[in-house]
Image (cartoon, rainbow, N blue to C red):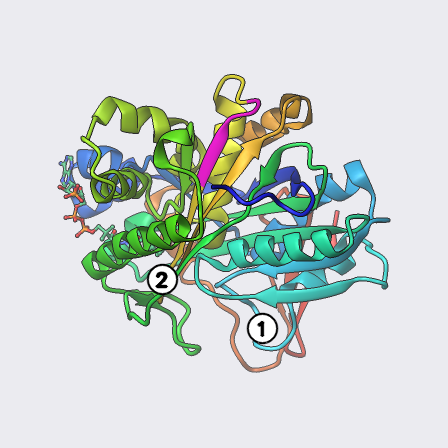
Amino acid sequence: MVSASPSPAGIHDLSFATTEFVLPHTALAAYNGTEIGKYHVGIGQQAMSVPAADEDIVTMGAAAAAPIVSRHGTDRIRTVVFATESSIDQAKSAGVYVHSLLGMPSATRVVELKQACYGATAALQFALGLVRRDPAQQVLVIASDVSKYDLDSPGEATQGAAAVAMLVGAEPALVRIEEPSGLFTADVMDFWRPNYRETALVDGQESITAYLQAVQGAWKDYQEQGGRGLESFDAFCYHQPFTKMAYKAHRHLLNCCGHVIDEAQIARAIGQTTAYNRVVGNSYTASLYLALAALLDDAGDLSGRSVGFLSYGSGSVAEFFAGTVVPGYQAHLRTAAHRQAISRRQPVDYARYRELHGLSFPPDGADHPTPPQTTGPFRLSGLRDHKRVYERR
Ligand code: CAA
């Protein structure tokens, strides 16, 4: 039996932003001699977003959130939760920079959350708790990440970058989030990034196995908590480090539930969630919500339909939960802006991408201005006295 939520709460608005540049996988394949089918079919990726020298999780997060603040104002937003695993500071929340860039009121609580790619789901659940405590309040959740692996490593093909901003509130216009949730935590070293490294470390095959075990564990707990049956869902949004992973995960879930594997049925359940991730690449904690954006933007009328969400963060924590698409949601979508965020990116060649990949600020406290490369609404203008300096255009 599905337990009733104390009051309907969920995602009232959703907006995403990505980077200035994009590297097509054809360029990577031409450089490293990989047969392109491995990227296009084997992992299901066409391209990956590449940040300019003056972009980071803050500029993307602000660009994703600005349209939400402009549409709804800030009067009801008393909390901003910034979820990331590519944090720019060990102490200060990236959300405070965004709060400032967006001119939000001082009477706001701002915090940063981390648990690999699961962070945004923790942020969403905490936001729902705040909204249920006081339905007059709204919470701005921002998920923003730059996925970066070593050059010439197997992970290189699964990089990317994006930010998703969600306004969480009572009587949401897009998706009502239900209780209960299915939870799973296991201490595994499948993917991690020590503080001294710019790029993540990963055991690729172990990470896939850990993800699948987490799907099974979160689903088992979801059932034990009285969740819906598998057949009551119309679509499934999975964390997508590469889009093929969503198919692997769903196949595994069906197997665990004793269902006969029907590839056409899997394609129907997953296919419309992959359009953005396929060309953006891994955006870590934003990726699950990019999958939701693609589903809402690309599928036909989903009014009243149930969506299953599986959030996975290496290390590892996973959560399965359900949402119902709110009738009339289509009037609130940002489909044109989302498509523009993808199509406005400038393709770079492999040499330029490699140069951008190698950029980092020296730790000497000197003045390090960044070259103006992004044409987005916010830019990181440099590092001065160990302080990141941002500007709004
Ligand atoms: N045509 C079609 N398919 C091809 C092909 C071709 N020419 N050549 C290879 N393939 C297929 C392979 O058969 C394989 O398919 P299956 O997985 O279905 O067997 C697929 O392409 C990938 O091939 P490999 O396994 O040989 O690829 P790889 O060794 O280069 O590693 C990877 C792939 C493990 C995903 C690697 O890119 C990686 O380590 N990525 C980072 C880690 C990651 O994304 N893990 C996901 C789970 S962890 C997580 O979700 C958290 C997170 O965000 C990091």
Amino acid at pointer 2 = Ser
Secondary element under disc 1, as helix, strand or loop, is: loop
Pick whichever of labels 1 and 2 is earlier in the sequence: 1
Query: Which span is picked out in magenta?
Result: 303-308
Give the camera-side residue of 44 and 220: 220
Residue 226 place in picture, x, y as percent:
44, 47
Which residue is rendered at x = 46% and y = 63% of the image?
A: 359
Assess whether residue 306 is covered by the magenta stretch. yes
Q: Could you tell me residue 231's position as x and y percent?
A: 36, 30
Find out whether residue 389 is within the magenta segment.
no
Classify 20 as above or below 132: above
Answer yes or no: disc 2 within 8 Å of ligand 1: yes
Q: Residue at x 67, y 79 (%)?
A: 385
User: Marks 1 and 2: which is nearer the front?
Assistant: 2
Q: Is residue 368 left or right of residue 155?
A: right
Label number found at residue 89? 1
State yes or no: Cβ of the residue under disc 1 lies below 8 Å from any atom of ligand 1: no
Residue marked by disc 2: 314
Q: CA distance from mark 1 to mark 2?
A: 21 Å
- Residue 196, image x, y percentages: 42, 78
Three-letter amino acid code at the position of disc 1: Asp
Vertical relation: 67 (above or below) 121? above
Q: Camera-side residue: 302 or 360?
A: 302
Residue 311 - label: none
Nearer-the-camera pick, 66 or 347: 66
Q: Kindly identify the residue that appears in the image at 26 percent across and 52 percent down.
A: 212
Asked if residue 186 is positioned above or below residue 376 in the image, the reply reads: below
